[in-house]
Image (cartoon, helix red, strand yellow):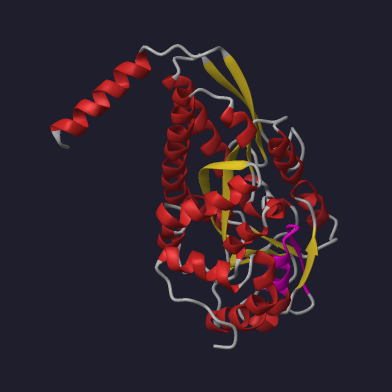
């Protein structure tokens, strides 16, 4: 590090250390349990900001949708009645459909691409969409690919999806994806998912290993899981832009830096803990399968789902703007 950069950091630290912040307590609505990736992100953010403000700014965390389901929590964040919330991206899409780009099936090939797509220019583009809707994304919570589980039988190929009903969020993109795969999507709120699985309203759902474990889906008849890499579950930690604008510039910087810290923390947590969760679930009886024909799934997504949902995520131009920001080839229907 250059002497100039070091001096700048020292000056900034001294300035912050001598800055007093008005005593304030903010609520953070968290959709998932405390030991989930959402919980890790929220706690990392809380710890960073409270330490950086010498405890002047405090946070109360409300897990398991205590402040309402994720859709309701995001509505209240938009209004400013709840300052912060963490939830699945599908529940933020209704406020700006362009954020639905992140749900496009087979948009990301692997975790490295997900990280690229949530930092730098891609993140700036997504932030512009969120700000239009009244939110500021502080952290992208990484929660693994949405692997498909069900109570009936193993899914090893595309034909195995037939006659199965799957819980999906209120996401037109994911609904079209499941139709392209031959399954029957049923929109159900996250808060009602466990009961719907347990009572047989639907046969299956989709989530990563840590989320599957923390939600105890193995106790809701979910016996079979297939590692389908069709979509990566991103869950933004957002602050109401109305609330953010009322903060001092000094606190705004700390809030933004806290989000960066939380995103790095949850990424490391995901990398370290997902395999452990998988091993524990297998030991308890979960049957995990790999696809024999994932290329066919990807082809179905690009040829059937993408053309049907392009307009619902801002159109071909918006999709290609994001792909360009990621350094990926453009997409054109029929090609």
Q: Position of residue 55 (x, y in %)?
A: 49, 15
| Quarter of the image where one finds residue 173 | bottom right
Q: Position of residue 279 (x, y in %)?
A: 51, 55
Residue 41 magenta? no
Q: Which residue occupies 37% across, 19% down?
A: 16
| Quarter of the image where one finds residue 85 | top right
Residue 224 vertical position relative to residue 34 in the rendered view, above or below: below
Residue 166 magenta? yes
Q: Residue furthest left?
A: 3
Quarter the C terminus occupies: bottom right
Q: Which residues are magenta?
A: 164-178
| Quarter of the image where one finds residue 31 | top right
Q: Residue furthest bottom?
A: 335
Q: Which residue occupies 17% across, 37% down?
A: 1
Q: Position of residue 286 (x, y in %)?
A: 62, 60
- Quick check: can you spot residue 153? no
Q: Position of residue 95 (x, y in %)?
A: 70, 51
- Quick check: can you spot residue 331? yes
Compare residues 72 and 316 and report the one nearer the observer: 316
Q: Which residue occupies 15% across, 36% down?
A: 2
Q: Which residue occupies 55% across, 83% down?
A: 293
Q: How many marks?
A: 0
């Amino acid at each position: 590090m250059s002497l100039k950069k070091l001096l700048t950091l020292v000056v900034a630290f001294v300035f912050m250390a001598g800055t007093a912040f008005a005593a304030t307590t903010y609520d953070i609505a968290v959709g998932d349990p405390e030991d989930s990736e959402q919980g890790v992100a929220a706690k990392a953010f809380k710890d960073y900001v409270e330490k950086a403000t010498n405890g002047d700014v405090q946070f109360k965390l409300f897990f398991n949708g205590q402040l309402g389901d994720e859709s309701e929590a995001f509505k209240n964040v938009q209004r400013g009645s709840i300052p912060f919330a963490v939830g699945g991206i599908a529940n933020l899409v209704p406020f700006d459909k362009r954020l639905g780009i992140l749900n496009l099936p087979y948009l990301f090939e692997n975790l490295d691409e997900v990280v690229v797509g949530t930092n730098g220019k891609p993140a700036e583009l997504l932030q512009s969409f969120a700000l239009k809707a009244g939110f500021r994304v502080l952290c992208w919570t990484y929660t693994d690919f949405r692997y498909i589980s069900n109570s009936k039988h193993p899914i090893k190929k595309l034909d195995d999806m037939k006659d199965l009903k799957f819980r999906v969020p209120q996401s037109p993109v994911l609904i079209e994806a499941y139709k392209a795969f031959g399954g029957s999507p049923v929109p159900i709120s996250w808060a009602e998912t466990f009961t719907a699985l347990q009572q047989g309203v639907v046969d299956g759902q989709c989530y990563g290993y840590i989320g599957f474990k923390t939600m105890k889906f193995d106790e809701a008849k979910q016996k079979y899981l297939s590692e389908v890499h069709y979509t990566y579950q991103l869950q933004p930690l957002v602050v109401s832009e109305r609330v953010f604008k009322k903060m001092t510039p000094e606190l705004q910087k700390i809030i933004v830096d806290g989000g960066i810290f939380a995103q790095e923390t949850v990424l490391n947590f995901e990398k370290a803990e997902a395999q452990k969760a998988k091993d524990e679930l297998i030991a308890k009886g979960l049957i995990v399968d790999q696809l024999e024909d994932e290329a066919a799934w990807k082809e179905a997504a690009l040829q059937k789902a993408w053309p049907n949902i392009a307009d619902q995520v801002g159109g071909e131009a918006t999709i290609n703007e994001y792909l360009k920001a990621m350094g990926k080839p453009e997409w054109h229907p029929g090609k």
